Amino acid sequence: MTKSENDCFLCSRAKNECIYSSKFVFVIRDNKFPVTKHHTLIATHRHVSDFFDLNNEELNDLSNVLKKQRQLLINLDKEITGFNVGVNAGVDAGQSIMHCHIHLIPRRKGDMDNPRGGVRGVIPSKQKYNK
């Protein structure tokens, strides 16, 4: 492991919390700072900074695992009615762990008053918009 990998939460500690692993990615629940119940992180085995550093094989595997995890969560929790899928790429986009990972955030009817705008909420003044 390189120095950055030794300091990386996803390289050093999170793999111990793995609930699923494929050829290129592994899955953990975000138990430290979950947005909602069953908030899931899908991270690459290879230590790369962000989503845009992934090769095609990793992207394909990530896509397949993301879909499988979505279905698993729907089967696990019948209250789930939607999902947010998020990628933070770069410090200015809010990335705090410099290891590629995708957030799969289950949503439930009524978990907030008006969810319209979804991921646009990363800049709160831009979340609500008129048609």
Image (cartoon, rainbow, N blue to C red):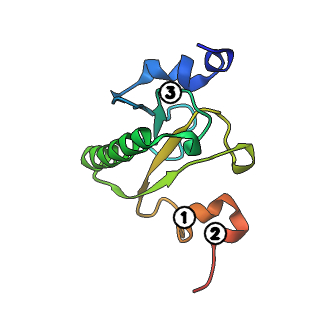
Q: Nearer the viewer, residue 48 or 85?
A: 48
Q: Quadrant of the N terminus?
A: top right
Mark 3 belongs to which amino acid? Arg
Q: Residue furthest right?
A: 92
Q: Quadrant of the C terminus?
A: bottom right
List the residue tagged with mark 1: 118
Q: Earlier in the sequence, mark 3 or mark 1?
A: 3
Mark 2 surroundings within 10 Å by alpha-carbon count, few (fewer than 14), some (14 through 19), many (20 or more): some
**Cβ–Cβ under 8 Å for marks 3 and 2:** no
Comparing 39 with 52, the one in front is 52
Residue at position x 73%, y 43% in the image: 91
**Across the whole image, how many numbered discs are drawn on residues?**
3
Q: Which mark is residue 30?
A: none
Distance between mark 3 and mark 2 Cα atoms: 34 Å
Mark 3 vs mark 2: in front: 3
Q: Which residue is mark 3?
A: 46
The residue labelled by disc 2 is: 127
Give neighbour class at mark 3: few <14, some 14-19, many 20+ (Cα, 10 Å).
some
Q: Whole-percent x and y of residue 64?
A: 32, 45
* CB-based contact (under 8 Å), mark 2 and mark 1: yes
Tell me the kind of residue under disc 1. Gly
Q: Provide residue 56's location: percent of width, then percent of height.
A: 43, 43
Q: Is residue 122 above or below residue 48?
A: below
Q: Residue furthest bottom?
A: 131
Judged from this view, the residue extending furthest toward the left is 75
Label 1: few (<14), some (14–19) or many (≥20) C-alpha neighbours in 10 Å: few
Pinpoint residue 118: horizontal percent, then vertical percent: 54, 64
The correct choice, above or below, for 66 with respect to 7 in the image is below
Q: Identify the amino acid type marked 2.
A: Gln
* Residue at disc 3, secondary structure: loop
Q: Secondary structure at mark 1?
A: helix
Against 63, residue 109 (above or below) is below
